[in-house]
Image: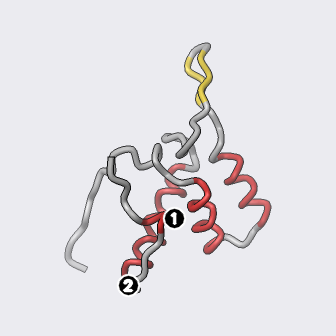
Amino acid sequence: MNWVLEADIVSFFDSLDRTELKKLIQIRVADGSLLRLIGKCLHVGVLDGADYTEPEQGTIQGSGLSPLLGISICTTCSTYGSNGRSSRACSAKQR
C-alpha cells in the first residue's frame, strides 16, 4: 500500500445506530460478559457541571470505548465493501 486515507466524519459517534453497532461487534467478539459491558457503555450519559444528559441515539465521544467502536465499525464496513456487500450500519446517513 502506498497511500493513507484520513477522514473526519461529522457526527460519527452521535449518529451511530446502537442496535446495528452491537450486531457488528458480535461478529468479532464472542465473550458475553464483554458484550454486556459494551452495551452498558453505549448508554452512558455525560455530566457537565450539574447538568446530566443521556443521548437517545449514538454514543458519547471521548470515552475509552470510542476508539474501539470506531475501529470496529470502520473495519467491518471496509470488509463489507471489499466483498461487494452492504450493511445498514455501514451506509452513510444524509443530514
Give the camera-side residue of 89 and 62. 89
Mark 1 burial class by Cα count in 10 Å: few <14, some 14-19, many 20+:
some
Q: Which residue is pictured at 65% across the width and 38% down the height?
A: 44
Quadrant housing residue 22: bottom right
Q: Are marks 2 and 1 in contact (CB under 8 Å)?
A: no
Give the residue furthest to the front.
95
Mark 2 burial class by Cα count in 10 Å: few <14, some 14-19, many 20+:
few
Amino acid type for the residue under numbered disc 1: Ser
**Taking 93 as reference, is 4 left or right?**
left
Residue at mark 2: 84
Residue at mark 1: 72
Q: Which residue is pictured at 53% across the width and 46% down the height?
A: 58
Quadrant housing residue 20: bottom right
Q: Secondary structure at mark 2?
A: loop
Q: Which residue is pictured at 38% across the width and 78% down the height?
A: 81
Amino acid type for the residue under numbered disc 2: Gly
Chain-order first, disc 2 or disc 1: 1
* Residue 91, horizontal then vertical, whole percent: 40, 64
